[in-house]
Image (tube, helix red, strand yellow):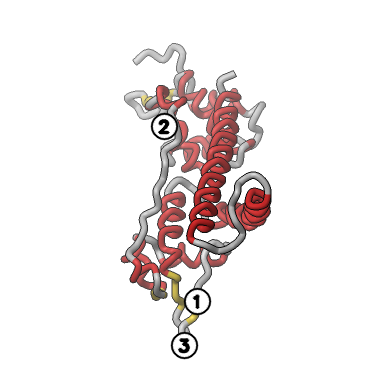
Amino acid sequence: MPDAGYLTIGKVVKRLQAQYPDLTISKVRYLENEGLVSPSRTPSGYRLYSQRDITRLEKVLYLQKNRFMPLSVIKGALDGEEGNRAAENAAPMTVVPQRDDEETAGKLHPIDRMPKLCGTQVSFVRQLSEAGIVELKRSPHGRDLVDGRDLPLIRLCDELRRFGFGAKNLRQYVIAANRESATFEQALMVYAKKGGGVEPERTDESRRQFDEAFSRMLGLTNAVRTELVTRRVKEAFKDMDT
């Protein structure tokens, strides 16, 4: 393979150090070991970086430094971007939590059963508890117990963990949920008194109207949140193309 147009790892570091002063050959090698960049190799084993490799490396460094994104998230985003650019404008996937039967959901479960019930490590469930995402109960014998109603939430968090979202990252959603629940309560009261026609008396019909209004509000706010997050993330990657 001809060397024209390709740079060695040392020249790549020298080129990018003006923008990223702490960049070293060791760091670039680490990013390669993590699958973030994949330079070509000469028969004698020397790394050769194409312009495409350098552009990808610049994106990794930018997103890590300025967007504070975990490397696993950056890798997934860049691999997806390169593998299927046609998906850029695709609608977000709707995620439906896996629900449990009434018996499982209505009881407390020893935390050591989480690998079997959720496919989740016990240590991760403890991290979720420390972050305030789930609340562990204590049995009379001192065992930590998990509320069956929290199992779908644990599964969702565990899948997010595989994309680089740790329990501490998910803490922001607890804060947001606490804040938004108060907003929903106020909005539903206004809706009931003014334009919605939801009667304050607790009848089957009023409960049905309440559930319909709440579901619609939740769907609309989720759509707004998804649109805003999608826009921000796409802008972050667009910055790297200019």
Compared with 227, 166 (above or below) is below
Separation of disc 1 and disc 2 at Cα? 41 Å
Disc ID at residue 88: none
| Dots 2, 3 in contact, CB < 8 A | no
Residue marked by disc 1:
137
Q: Name the residue beneath numbered marker 2.
A: 79
Quadrant occupied by the C terminus: top right
Q: Are marks 3 and 1 in contact (CB under 8 Å)?
A: no
Report x, y in % for residue 82: 41, 26
Amino acid marked by disc 1: Lys
Q: Regarding mark 2 in the picture, which secondary structure is present there?
A: helix
Q: Quadrant of residue 239?
A: top right
Viewer-side residue, 114 vs 57: 114
In this rendering, position of residue 144 left or right of residue 17: left
How many discs mark residues in the rendered view? 3
User: At x 48% / y 18%, what residue is drawn?
Assistant: 51
> Residue 118: where, in percent of width, then height?
36, 61
In the foreground, 186 or 163:
186
At label 2, the amino acid type is: Asp
